[in-house]
Each structure stands twice: as C-alpha cells, then as structure tokens.
Image (spheres, coloured by chain):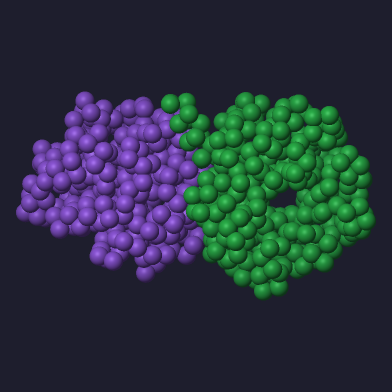
Chain colours: A purple, B green
Amino acid sequence: MNFVKITEVGPRDGLQNEKAIVPTDAKFEFIQALAKTGLQHIEATSFVKKEWVPQMGDAEELTKLIFGGNPIDPEIQLSCLTPNIKGYEKAVSLGFKEVAVFTASSESFTKKNINKTIDESITAFLEIFQRAKEDNVKVRGYISTVIACPYEGKISPDKTLTVAKKLLDAGVYEISLGETIGVAVPSEVESLLNVLLKEIPSRLLAGHFHDTYGMAISNVKQSLNMGLRSFDSSAGGLGGCPYAKGASGNLATEDLVYFLEREGYHTGVDLDALVNASSLMEKALNRPLLSRTYVAKSKAKESS
Amino acid sequence: MNFVKITEVGPRDGLQNEKAIVPTDAKFEFIQALAKTGLQHIEATSFVKKEWVPQMGDAEELTKLIFGGNPIDPEIQLSCLTPNIKGYEKAVSLGFKEVAVFTASSESFTKKNINKTIDESITAFLEIFQRAKEDNVKVRGYISTVIACPYEGKISPDKTLTVAKKLLDAGVYEISLGETIGVAVPSEVESLLNVLLKEIPSRLLAGHFHDTYGMAISNVKQSLNMGLRSFDSSAGGLGGCPYAKGASGNLATEDLVYFLEREGYHTGVDLDALVNASSLMEKALNRPLLSRTYVAKSKAKESS
C-alpha cells in the first residue's frame, strides 16, 4: 500500500527538451548512476527520427551501451519511447523489454505534434501492440495534455477517459497521465481522476506532472489520496518547459522522492545518490538544475 | 469563506535575506508597485540595529517615504518588524499602525538568533504589547521553527502551542507559524495544526511556509483544508534560504496566488501586476528570482 513506483524519465523526456545535446557516453554514465539510486524504472531514450529530435539521435548507440559489455543491472526495467513499428523493432532487437507509445487528449496537440488525429495515432500503434504481445514486451501508454492543452486550453476529463480506454483495450499495461504544460491544480486533478477511476482501476494509472507553476507536488498528493501509486519524474527536473523556455518542466525526481519518503511512502530511492546522478547532467548541460530539493541538497553540501 | 489573506513579506523577510543591499528608492518603488497589485498587507521593513541587519539599515528613511509626500494607499495595511521597544517607538512615531514581533518554538534557535530564551523574548515584548494597546497599534506575532529547527531538528507541536498561547495572551492579533527551514511535508503540518486548533481558533493562525524542498504549496493546501485562511509569502520568492545559500526560501507570492485563485479561493491580487513588481527586484538584485510562476509568466511574456 505504501510503495510508490517512480518512472524516471530524465534521460528521455528530460534530455529531449534540453537545448544542449548530451554526448552518448555522458548519457550512459547518467543512466548507470540512476541505476544505482534504487530507481527501478528508467526510460532511457526514444527511437524517433534524428531530424525531429536530435537530442535522441543516438538511441541506437546508447542502447548498445546499455545492453552491452557493461550492462545496467538486469533487475531494473529500462524502457524507451517508440513512435512507430520501425522504432519498436529496432528497440526490441537491441534489448528493450518495455516500450512506450505516445498520444494526447487534445486533437490540436496530437495534430501539431505528430500530424495525426488521436484515433489515427492509436491505430498507428496497433502493429506495435500486436508485435509486443508476440514478443512478450510490455507497452506503456502516455497521454499528453490530460488537463489542459497549449492550443485548446481546458480539456474535458471525458476526452482523456476515451483515449485511456482505447489504449488499455489495445494492450498498454499502464497509462501515464501527462499534465504537459504544468498548469493544473489539485481540484482539476481530482475532477479528472473522479471520471477516470469510475471505469479504470487506479493501479493502471500513473501521474506525470510538470512543475511549471510549482503545483506538481500538490497534484501528486491529490493523486495519492485518490489511490494512485505510480508517478513519472525527471532527475534534477531535467527538461524544462517547451512552452516557456527557462521555466520548470517535469516534476523533479528529487522533489518527488523527498515528498514521498517524508510522507511515509516507500520509494526505494536513495536521495543522495540521486543528487549525485543529477549533478552529472548539471555539468554536462552547463546550466543550473531547477529541482528545489536538488538545489537545497547541493547547496547544503557545498556549505558543509 | 473563500477569501484568503496574504501578508506580503518580500520587502522585509525577503530583502533581509538577500546578499545585495537594495537602495531605499528602489525599495520604495517596489512597495509602491506591490501596493497596486491588490495586496492588502505588506510588511515593509524592520527596525533592527543596522549592524545586525544591514539590509534593513534604511528603515527610517524608507518609512518616511512610505508615509511621506507620495504615500502608499492608506487602505493597505503596512507593517514592520520591531524587535524591541526602541524600534517600536520609532516605527509608530513614523506612521506604522501595525508591528510584528518575533520568537521561535526552538530554544536553540531563539538563543542563536536573538540571544534570549523563548520566555525572555516574550517578556521583552511585554512593553511593546502594553504600548501598542495604548496606541491602538496592531501586533502580529511570528513563531519561527514551528516544525523543525536547523539546530534541534524536529520540534514537538506542544512547544509551538505553548509559545502561541503566550503570544495570544500577550495581545497579538494573529500568529504567523514559520516553517523556517522549509523541510515540512503536509502530514507534519497536519500534526501541528491538530494540536494548535484544539486550543486556538483557525482565524488567529497564519501559515508561513518556505519552499526550500518544493513543499510549500502542498503545506498551504493542508492548512486550507484545516481552516486556515491567512498565509505569508514573498514576491518572486525573494530571500532565498539562509541555511542553504542559493536555494529557495519563502514561498513565492506568485505561486501562492496562482494556486489559490486556480483552486477557487479569492485573494484580490492581480498576478500580472505582481510579476511586474517582482521584476523590479530581479533587476535591483541582478539575480534570477526562483518563483516557478514568476519564471513561467516572465518567460511566456518574453516568447510572445
């Protein structure tokens, strides 16, 4: 009851939204360090076209390191984003046993992001779901803009419910509910979950909050109160916000772990080891990380 | 029921903890800007010895501007910190109708901070309370380290209850509960308030949270759930954390207003006007402010 699953998305969702392109070796070192923090779920990379997301252009090279001569502890579940069957095939052939697919609750967002309707995006994944079943590969489903969209504004919970049910029917083992632009407050999370939980068990849902306006932890608390026990976060708060450059994006794993452990939940994550892992990326990116807990722990260390 | 009182402490608690000393004119301009945001309660300065807190060394000069030829809207309740009767007399003679006094729940903290025991600190205020009654001046009471102390660690809620009752008996109209080092999580706020609210009505209590570990908003939400309707915050998150230089300190007023208004509470504060006021201090201090909402709003403005 008290264990909370954390999916670390820093190496993928975080680094994908950083301006600087981190060298593959530094990414591997980062993932190795994350793997020693107690984190059990790490999203490592994305098999997208290099022209679209140059930050993820080394997915194949990085994956070879991850499953290569000096592999990550096999107990740790590593995953990657696969936008199409070609990406899926490459990812699985190189060693991934879990992949993630990506759609949204907002038609405008899906159209702008992947030039498909929501239904077209799900149809495009059907081949992945089929193959994943045959290959015994787990598929996780991201739904973006579950509460608000940068183009459409407020999104009705019913839209997210419809998309979530389609993804679950198609075979995802968990839905990550992406509050992509970080504007939501707990009452909105409550409204959304009230609708979703009528038809979907809480164990199939994860919260993916952004901290753009500093609301992420209060939204996690709301979700916990309503039964969710799975959250995504990004080490150090890596990634920032694509809609307000320089602002905070993904909830920082440090802030999440601090909150959960202090509130009596169990994460299995060593906060000091996590701060050390994040510091590798602070150096690689040459910009200060924005996680409150990361900064407080780093500064306290500096002054001691 | 839905109105929440905000006490803006940026000009005092914020600037007091900044390294740079802001010129008096710039402080006055800042307070003028704050007074146009809809904020009704602004703590403007502190009448302490200049040698102790050089940042507040211009209290007299600033106060003369505030109540001078170009005064702040008299509807706005301006206050100042007065550590002793001498400071009180000066503050009131220059125009303040509200002052604040300061003690803590931790003996070690009080000893280190003002070289008194807690009881000695309250005794030292008795003359202020007596005079304030005669002068019809309101007195607000700060209690620091209500949940944890940088020297003693965890503080028992009973200690805070004892101090709060003494201050209320002495005549303060409101107690500001200072979570000075920003380590608390909602379950600890709940434990504290469960003890306090058995003997003290919620309308006499204000929450003063720090965001050092990113927990402030979730602590505000916990306090709201338990009936509190008064919170302190600092524009832009001014002040930082004296125990981890470079880390966040006071909850930012922008984050608080964003949260409250989006959650259906009423603050009367215009968020854009507030961002403008804070930007004056970002320039004066020549360092980026840390408020999540301030940054998101500023960056969104830059990109539009």
Q: Quadrant of the N terminus of chain A?
A: bottom left
Question: Above or below — where is A235 with respect to B219?
Answer: above
- Say if A210 sits above or below B128 in the image: above
Query: Can residue B79 be seen at all in this image of the molecule?
Result: yes
Q: Above or below — where is B75 with respect to A198?
A: above
Q: Where's residue A214, x and y in %? A: 49, 45
Q: Position of residue B304 (x, y in %)?
A: 43, 26
Left or right? Give the position of B72 relative to B236: right
Residue visible at 47% across and 65% down? A264
Q: Nearer the viewer, residue A142 or A260?
A: A142
Regarding residue A289, the answer to whether it shows in the image is no
Residue farthest along the bottom direction in this orientation: B198
Q: Report the residue at 36% width, 27% height from top.
A: A20
**Residue at the (65%, 30%) spot, across then down:** B281
Residue in the foreground of this view, choosing between B139 and B183:
B139
- In the rendered view, does A190 fall on the left or right side of B5? left
In this view of the protein, which residue sits in the foreground, A125 or A268?
Answer: A125
Q: Position of residue A230 (x, y in %)?
A: 34, 58
